[in-house]
Image (spheres, rainbow, N blue to C red):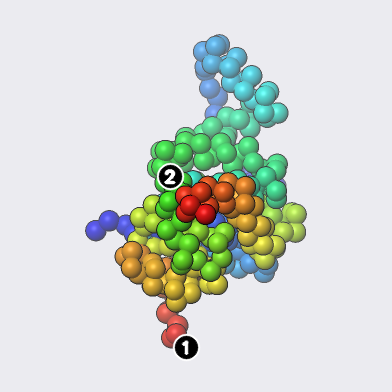
């Protein structure tokens, strides 16, 4: 059986790679997900749309590390899933709470993952968004939810 | 200090042309030959694993964020701002045109 293919939203990616530990030095949920990835439990599909956002965040907050960041990712550009077309973005507009999220929703469909990973509950986990992901055969999980999928946490009862 | 005990030495014999080009690349990036060689070895190993080098990126970015005092809330806000800016600058007009508005 092939490994699950996980599409991380930019926020989830930032939580994993920038904040793998909390302020007390304990491993964070993002850090645990990063460990799982490093152990080969699942594959990430990174979108060019997500990497674009990450690059801009690097420009703004980590200018000293930008060159190193680009050098690390350079060998993997062929593995990035493509940008969505304007038509593909237009098609998801009725589903998104915030219009700014449309390119990322469309990029997720282009990437065709098993799981969309996002801790942005207001945008990615609304009933409308959940129905949308389900319609496309995609599960949407938070960092906590992904750990549940791999038996690292117990699923909480939905209220 | 502890990391210094874990340093190992590799002596390389390389063709002079490669040495020249490597020295130039290091100079252009304001790195020492040693720093660039370590970076090149890390990149090679990451490529060999065939997985995105997220752990390596984290090893670089997490200490930087801590040194700057950046919080997760701040950075998430910046991600939202970047997303809005990209939408405005790159997608907004194209989507409106595609929708025939």
The residue singled out by tag 1 in the image is A159
Image vertical order of residue B21 relative to residue A21, above or below: above
- A121 lies left or right of A133: right
Q: Nearer the viewer, residue B23 or A130?
A: A130
Q: Residue at x 63, y 67 (%)?
A: A22
> Label 2: chain?
A
Neighbor class of circle 1 (other Cα within 10 Å; few <14, some 14-19, many 20+) is few
Q: What secondary structure is found at the residue carrying circle 2?
A: loop
The answer to which quarter of the image holds residue A26 is bottom right
Q: Position of residue A117 (x, y in %)?
A: 46, 63
Q: Position of residue B16 (x, y in %)?
A: 55, 11
Q: What secondary structure is found at the residue carrying circle 1?
A: loop
Q: Earlier in the sequence, mark 1 or mark 2?
A: 2
The residue singled out by tag 2 in the image is A82
Whether residue B15 is visible here, answered yes or no, is yes
Residue furthest to the bottom in view is A159
Q: Residue at x 56, y 36 (%)?
A: A71
Q: Residue at x 33, y 64 (%)?
A: A136
Image vertical order of residue A66 relative to residue A150, above or below: above
Q: Position of residue A67 (x, y in %)?
A: 63, 37
Q: Nearer the viewer, residue A83 or A19?
A: A83
> Label 1: chain?
A
């Amino acid at each position: 059986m092939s490994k699950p293919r996980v599409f991380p939203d930019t926020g989830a990616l930032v939580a994993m790679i920038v904040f793998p530990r909390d302020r007390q030095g304990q491993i964070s949920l993002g850090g645990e997900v990063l460990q799982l990835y490093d152990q080969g439990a699942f594959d990430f599909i990174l979108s060019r749309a997500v990497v674009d956002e990450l690059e801009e965040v690097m420009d703004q907050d980590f200018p000293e590390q930008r060159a190193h960041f680009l050098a690390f990712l350079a060998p993997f550009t062929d593995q990035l899933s493509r940008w969505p077309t304007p038509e593909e973005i237009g098609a998801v507009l009725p589903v998104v709470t915030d219009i700014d999220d449309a390119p990322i929703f469309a990029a997720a469909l282009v990437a065709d993952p098993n799981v969309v990973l996002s801790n942005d509950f207001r945008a990615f986990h609304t009933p409308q968004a959940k129905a949308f992901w389900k319609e496309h055969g995609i599960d949407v999980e938070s960092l906590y939810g992904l750990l549940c999928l791999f038996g690292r946490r117990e699923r909480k009862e939905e209220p | 200090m502890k990391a210094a005990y874990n340093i190992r030495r590799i002596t390389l014999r390389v063709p002079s042309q490669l040495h020249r080009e490597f020295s130039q690349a290091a100079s252009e990036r304001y790195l020492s030959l040693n720093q660039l060689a370590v970076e090149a070895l890390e990149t090679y190993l990451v490529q060999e694993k065939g997985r995105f080098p997220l752990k390596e990126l984290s090893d670089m970015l997490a200490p930087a964020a801590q040194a700057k005092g950046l919080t997760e809330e701040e950075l998430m806000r910046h991600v939202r701002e970047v997303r809005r800016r990209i939408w405005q600058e790159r997608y907004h007009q194209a989507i409106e045109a595609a929708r025939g508005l």
